[in-house]
Image (cartoon, grey):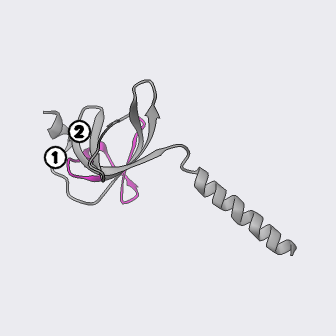
Amino acid sequence: MLKKAITFLLTSLFLAGVLLAHGNATHLMGTVTALGKDTVTIQDKDGKTVVVMLEKTTKYLKTKKPVNLDELKIGSRVVIDAQMNEKMKMYSAEEIQIGTGAGTASPAAAKK
C-alpha cells in the first residue's frame, strides 16, 4: 500500500511538472505570410491573420535544433510560443519552431 501511494505521488508530481513547463505561453500555429524587421505574420488554421513581435531573446528551432532567423521564410509552417504584450496588444514570440516545409523568401528578401 505504501509503495502504491509513493508511486502515485511521484507520478502526480512528474505530470504536474510537465504541465507547468510551458508556463503561460500561447501556442500559435500557422503559415508565415509576411516577415518584417521585427515581426512575423502568420495565417492560422482558421484563416485568421496574427502578427507576432520578434524579440532579441526569441529562440528559433528547426528539428529541435537552434537555427538563425534566416531559416524563417514566407510559406514556412511554424509553431510559436508567445506571450500577449498587453501594452502593445500584440503577441511577443518566445520561441518559434520552424517546420521542414519549403519557404519562399528569407527575412532579408522580405525587407527589400
Q: Are marks 2 and 1 in contact (CB under 8 Å)?
A: yes
- Nearer-the-camera pick, 11 or 100: 11
Which quarter of the rendering shows the N terminus?
bottom right
Q: Amino acid at mark 1?
A: Ala
Q: Position of residue 101 (x, y in %)?
A: 24, 60
Q: Quick one: SS at disc 1? A: loop
Is 27 contained in the magenta span? no
Q: Is residue 90 above or below residue 27?
A: above
Q: CA distance from mark 2 to mark 1?
A: 9 Å
Q: Which residues are magenta?
A: 56-77
Residue at horizontal 60%, vertical 50%? 20
Packing grade of label 2 (10 A; few <14, some 14-19, many >=20) is many
Q: Quick one: SS at disc 2? A: strand
The numbered disc on residue 15 is none
Q: Position of residue 112 (x, y in %)?
A: 12, 33
- Nearer-the-camera pick, 64 or 31: 31
**Residue at the disc numbered 1:** 105
Q: Position of residue 34 (x, y in %)?
A: 21, 40
Is 71 contained in the magenta span? yes
**Displayed quadrant of residue 57:** top left
Query: Which of the two labelled residues, at mark 2 and mark 1, occupies the earlier sequence position?
Result: 2
Residue at horizontal 40%, vertical 36%? 91
Q: Amino acid at mark 2?
A: Leu
**Residue at the disc numbered 2:** 35
